[in-house]
Amino acid sequence: MSDKKDIEKRKLQTTGGSTYIVSLPKKWVEEIKLESGDNVGIEKRGSFLMLYPAKLEEEADYKVKMEIEPDESPSAIKRKILSFYLGGLKTIKIEATDRLRPNHRKTIKDLARDKLVGTEIISETIEEITLQTLLSYSELSVEDALKRMYRVTSSMQENAMKALKGNDKEIAKDVIELDDEVDRFQFYLTRAVKASIENPSLLKKVGFNNKKEGLSYRLASKDVERAADHATHIAEGVLDTKGPIEKEILVHYTDMNSLSGSIFKKALDSLFEEDYVKAEEAIRERKNLYALEGELNNSLIDTKVSEPMSKRLIAESIRRIAEHGFNVAEISLNMSVLSENYISDSFSSELQI
């Protein structure tokens, strides 16, 4: 909520037959570095009007220079670059105090390739590397980024189960490698949502009507990313087991995973389609999921299988994927309720962040 000292009251005046004008405080104009003749944008948001400098409609080319020391660890370099990327910096110039060490150069290149969507090396010398994010928010909306995260995560879950059934270590390794792809779009989505909150003129570019939608998608993306982590845990379980899974246990895994995948899909569909009914259907499967997990755990005890703890952890990861689906379904329900017709425009505007 704005502080009272940041609120100015101005009277509307008419000019001509159909136009209203309002004056702006001189101090504000000077602070924002506007001049007479500059354009400003005006948008209607519920029962509010938002005014901003028209230059904010474009994505600013924010730049930063980052120095690294010869003994700086690769993990520290990654954290610095990632924080600048998530903060919306478009150009990151990385300079060494003397020259870039081979391990530092490799760290920077691997990070740009594996984790930073739309980011390329535009300049490279012995002493420095410059990264630039060339992809604009209008080219990849937040919804499209989340859809890609979901598709990869769903594929990871499906193939982790395939690896489990066939005791296929190679498929399991492929699943683990795909986790980086989910992280890439998670970082991009976080960057885009943060930018749209700091600069509301970007909301339409990233695909939102208001900040609340952006925050909801950000929360949903965290659940999708964590679901991908659990698909990775299933694949790691395949690598850790010493032999094929017992047939009776595989039947339980298959039933539980089928329901888990269905819940996850229905939850994400409810978000993308703004479907209240699908969200409710996903949440109603909670008891069925826990019942299947109970049957599996009982079977692990009754049949005296080998490595019961490892196999129980696999079941837990299958359940956790569904639970992250429940979280997404609840986010979808919250968004659906706030968009229903029975909420008045005035009340809806009060709910906007």
Image (tube, grey):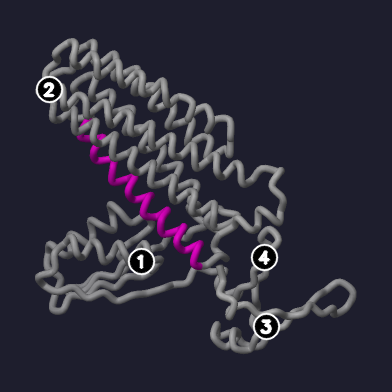
Residue that mark 2 sits on: 307
The quadrant of the picture occupied by the N terminus is bottom right
Q: Is residue 64 visible?
A: yes
Label 2 to label 4, Cα distance in Å? Answer: 61 Å
In magenta, the rendered stretch is: 172-198
- Which badge, 1 or 4, comes first in the chain's sequence? 4
Determine the residue positioned at 54% across, 30% down: 278
Residue that mark 1 sits on: 132
Q: Determine the secondary structure under disc 2.
A: loop
**Horizontal and vertical percent for residue 89?**
38, 68
**Nearest the eye: 102 or 71:** 71
As for residue 178 lying within the magenta part, the answer is: yes
- Which badge, 3 or 1, comes first in the chain's sequence? 3
Of discs 3 and 4, which sits in the foreground? 3
Asked if residue 289 lies left or right of residue 229, the reply is right
Of discs 1 and 2, which sits in the foreground? 2
**Horizontal and vertical percent for residue 215?**
48, 53
Amino acid identity at mark 2: Glu
Asked if residue 244 lies left or right of residue 16, the reply is left
Would you say the residues marked 1 and 4 are in contact, meaning their CB atoms lie under 8 Å apart? no
Amino acid identity at mark 3: Leu
- Which badge, 2 or 4, comes first in the chain's sequence? 4
Residue 334 in the image: above or below residue 277 = below
As for residue 117 lying within the magenta part, the answer is: no
Label 1 Cα neighbours within 10 Å, binned few <14 / some 14-19 / many ≥20? many
Residue that mark 3 sits on: 24
Determine the residue positioned at 37% across, 50% down: 186
